[in-house]
């Protein structure tokens, strides 16, 4: 009992002084945030209060094929797998950083054959500062074997929080790695969505080019018949042949672009090039144009992985400052050794062979050549750098969301006008054909009307795809999508 009392006192003292952790606890810095998005992006609405983040936000596009591609990409993409492996590495580093809070025990066993010099005195080693041992007190000139089994104890009492601050920093750095993995997943989803929309846009352009080619071939047949009857000139025939060749030449290039985009989508989803077989479907036939409400600025700060990652690195840097301060204070170490030691193997495991030594040691830094001061200055400087980076990340996030809100709102108005333009162009083309058949206009008016319709259809498809890709970018900028709060959560 007398042996355990000093150790118990040391433990109690450690608990009392455990509150002497150096450094300040992390406090989120004050940042300027807009009161609402309407000030940054006029004409847009903010989210209602009954909206919450959704995990599978891509389902807002109401396309099962797109959802399957995204879910496959999240499972098989190599960048995502690498990010997951980094998460495991970060968690292991947390365990390593926290290991210093616990006692370290090592078990050793050895046999040594010792021969003591005849030209020495028993116990002379004590005068030279050697630790007491059998070879020091042995008779000069003797030879014997020493059997030794021991357990070593080493435990640093973390009075000043150096180890705990290191663990806190490791936990924050692991959090930053997890947020980086979220950013990788968000970027992957955005890339898959944009690549899929591009393929469907090309399908729509192929459909437009195919219909245009059919119309021009039909027009060529009509012109050839009218030329035979003397109602049209050979110049009209040649002009129509040029337009037929132009429409036919668009199809191979559109097919090439679609194949290249399909290869990109295959790589994103972890497939080998050429293994993805997507049937041709026009963009409007497969994708809904969702109406996305926007969250408040405070919600944005809590969701965007780049902001959360920047804040996690700031937390880690703040903990490193406390860790650097702790190096200025004395460190207390409890060391001990105990085991069995005997020159006779038969008596090795008897009680008389037991020995031990245990006690505290204190180390006070006096002069380190400025190492501790430089370490603290470095930690504080890194914190200031990361603080400015954190604020810049927030400012950039607000800018991205505001830009995308303006773009999405403008695209909606643009689509309305372009649909009206296409309707008018189609009616003008119909009237020009009627007037041409009645001999009221020349064929140039018909060709010009067809050109306007082709341009209007193509521009409408491009705008529809641009709005979809901007919606995906908006989802990414907000860190996810939204569902009503009374809806079941996504898994």
Image (spheres, rainbow, N blue to C red):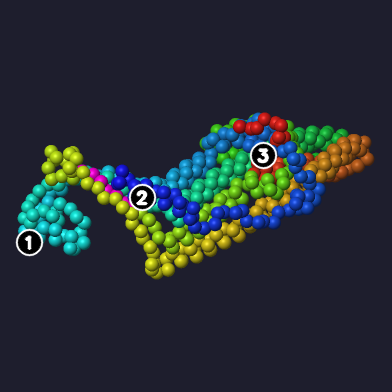
Is residue 304 at all visible to an observer of this figure? yes
Tag 3 secondary structure? strand
Q: Is residue 232 left or right of residue 385?
A: right
Q: Which residue in the structure is indicated by mark 1?
A: 119
Number of the front mark, 1 or 3: 1
- Residue 146 in picture, x, y percent from top left: 14, 47
In magenta stretch: residue 42: no
Going 42% across and 51% down the picture, which residue do you hit?
14
Mark 3 or 2 closer to N-term? 3
Residue at 87 percent of width and 40 percent of height: 424
The residue depicted at 58 percent of the width and 45 percent of the height is: 183
* Residue 189 image position (x, y, % from top left): 61, 40
User: Residue 212's x, y, as percent?
Assistant: 76, 37
Secondary structure, mark 2, is strand
Q: Residues within 10 Å of mark 2 (few under 14, many from 20)?
A: some
> Which residue lies under the disc numbered 3?
53
The total number of labels drawn is 3
Residues in magenta? 334-340
For label 2, the residue is 155
Tell whether 203 sits left or right of 132: right
Mark 1 or mark 3, earlier in chain:
3
Tell me the distance, in whole angstroms, between the alpha carbons under discs 2 and 1: 40 Å
């Amino acid at each position: 009992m007398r042996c355990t009392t000093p150790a118990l006192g040391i433990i109690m003292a450690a608990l009392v002084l455990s509150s002497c952790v150096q450094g300040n606890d992390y406090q989120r810095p004050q940042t300027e945030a807009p009161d609402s998005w309407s000030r940054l992006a006029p004409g847009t609405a903010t989210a209602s209060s009954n909206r919450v983040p959704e995990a599978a936000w891509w389902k807002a596009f109401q396309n099962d094929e797109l959802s399957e591609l995204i879910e496959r990409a999240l499972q098989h993409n190599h960048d995502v797998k690498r990010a997951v492996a980094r998460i495991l590495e970060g968690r292991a580093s947390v365990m390593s950083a926290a290991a210093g809070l616990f006692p370290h025990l090592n078990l050793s066993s050895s046999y040594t054959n010792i021969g003591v010099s005849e030209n020495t005195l028993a116990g002379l080693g004590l005068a030279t500062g050697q630790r007491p041992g059998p070879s020091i007190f042995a008779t000069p000139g003797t030879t014997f074997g020493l059997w030794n089994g021991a357990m070593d104890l080493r435990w640093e009492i973390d009075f000043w929080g150096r180890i705990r601050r290191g663990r806190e920093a490791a936990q924050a750095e692991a959090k930053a790695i997890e947020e980086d993995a979220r950013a990788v997943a968000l970027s992957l989803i955005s890339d898959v969505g944009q690549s899929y929309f591009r393929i469907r846009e090309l399908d729509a352009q192929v459909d437009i080019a195919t219909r245009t080619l059919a119309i021009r071939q039909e027009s060529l047949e009509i012109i050839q018949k009218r030329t035979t009857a003397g109602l049209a000139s050979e110049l009209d025939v040649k002009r129509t042949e040029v337009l037929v060749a132009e429409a036919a030449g668009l199809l191979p290039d559109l097919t090439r672009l679609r194949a290249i985009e399909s290869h990109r989508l295959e790589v994103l989803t972890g497939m080998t090039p050429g293994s993805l077989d997507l049937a041709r479907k026009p963009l409007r036939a497969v994708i809904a144009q969702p109406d996305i409400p926007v969250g408040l600025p405070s919600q944005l700060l809590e969701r965007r992985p780049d902001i959360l990652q920047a804040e996690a690195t700031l937390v880690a840097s703040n903990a490193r400052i406390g860790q650097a301060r702790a190096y200025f204070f004395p460190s207390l170490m409890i060391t001990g050794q105990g085991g069995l030691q005997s020159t006779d193997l038969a008596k090795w495991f008897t009680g008389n062979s037991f020995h031990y030594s245990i006690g505290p040691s204190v180390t006070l830094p006096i002069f380190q050549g400025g190492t501790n001061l430089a370490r603290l200055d470095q930690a504080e400087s890194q914190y200031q750098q990361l603080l400015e980076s954190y604020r810049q990340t927030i400012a950039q996030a607000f800018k991205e969301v505001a830009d995308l809100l303006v773009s999405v709102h403008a695209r909606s108005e643009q689509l309305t006008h372009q649909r009206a333009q296409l309707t008018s162009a189609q009616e003008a083309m119909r009237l020009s054909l009627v007037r041409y058949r009645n001999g009221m206009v020349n064929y140039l008016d018909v060709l010009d009307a067809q050109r306007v319709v082709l341009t209007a259809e193509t521009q409408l498809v491009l705008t529809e795809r641009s709005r979809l890709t901007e919606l995906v970018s908006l989802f990414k900028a907000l860190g996810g999508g939204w569902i009503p709060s009374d809806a079941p959560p996504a898994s």
